[in-house]
């Protein structure tokens, strides 16, 4: 890895870190605690370490794609996914809009799947780095929808 490439990796990590700050600014809090949730809801302590690992993988995948393909369709999908990722916390925990958050997370899952598909041949490693993210967001989507169904008045 060249110094220039390492610098670009730092930029990708910084971009992802900025998005992660949205999640740290809009935390579940007392409102979320009062909601009915399915039995399979993980404890709150699971989320920070899971997201820390995923955010590193997201940054590395984006960087890999940029290094190999530049800014094209795959990286545009990556960027749209980051916007949707940050928007989810705002919608769910900031605005208490469970239904809008569900729509956002379905769109996020779709962008993650598109990223995996777009990069499968040109950079399989970048695609594989997104597979845990795809699984986590599938689970989070099911959880978001379940919370929406259990809390129609919220």
Image (cartoon, grey):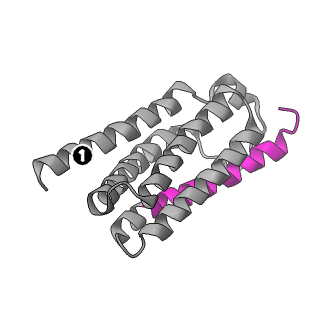
Q: Is residue 49 left or right of residue 135?
A: left
Rendering coords of residue 122 (x, y %): 35, 72
Which residue in the protein does label 1 denote? Answer: 8
In magenta segment, residue 135: yes
The picture quadrant where one finds residue 14 is: top left
Question: Which residue is at 34% across, 69% downward?
Answer: 123
Q: Residues within 10 Å of mark 1 (few under 14, many from 20)?
A: some
Quarter of the image with the N terminus is: bottom left
Q: Could you tell me what secondary structure mostly forms the magenta stretch?
A: helix
Rendering coords of residue 120 (x, y %): 42, 73
In this view, which residue lies farthest toward the left? 2
In magenta segment, residue 115: no
Q: Is residue 140 visible?
A: no
Q: Is residue 32 left or right of residue 63?
A: right
Question: Which residue is at 61% across, 31% downward?
Answer: 90
Magenta residues?
Answer: 130-154
Rendering coords of residue 85 (x, y %): 54, 43
In the figure, 10 relative to 24: above or below? below
In the figure, 71 relative to 122: above or below? above
Question: Which residue is at 39% across, 76% downward?
Answer: 121
Quarter of the image with the C terminus is: top right
Please tell me which residue lies in front, 25 or 9: 9
Q: Is residue 56 visible?
A: yes
Disc 1 element: helix
Please tell me which residue lies in front, 27 or 102: 102
Rendering coords of residue 29 (x, y %): 63, 25
Please tell me which residue lies in front, 41 or 115: 115
In this view, which residue lies farthest toward the right? 153
The picture quadrant where one finds residue 130 is: bottom left
């Amino acid at each position: 890895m060249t110094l220039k490439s390492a610098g670009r990796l730092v930029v990708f990590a910084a971009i992802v870190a900025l998005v992660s700050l949205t999640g740290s600014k809009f935390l579940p809090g007392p409102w979320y605690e009062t909601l009915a949730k399915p039995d399979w809801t993980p404890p709150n302590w699971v989320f920070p370490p899971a997201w820390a690992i995923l955010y590193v993988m997201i940054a590395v995948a984006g960087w890999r794609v940029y290094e190999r393909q530049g800014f094209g369709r795959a990286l545009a999908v990556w960027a749209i996914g980051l916007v949707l990722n940050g928007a989810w916390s705002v919608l769910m925990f900031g605005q208490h809009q469970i239904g809008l958050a569900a729509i956002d997370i379905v769109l996020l899952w779709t962008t993650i799947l598109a990223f995996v598909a777009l990069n499968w041949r040109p950079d399989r490693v970048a695609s594989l780095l997104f597979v845990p993210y795809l699984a986590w967001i599938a689970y989070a989507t099911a959880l978001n929808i379940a919370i929406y169904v259990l809390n129609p008045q919220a």
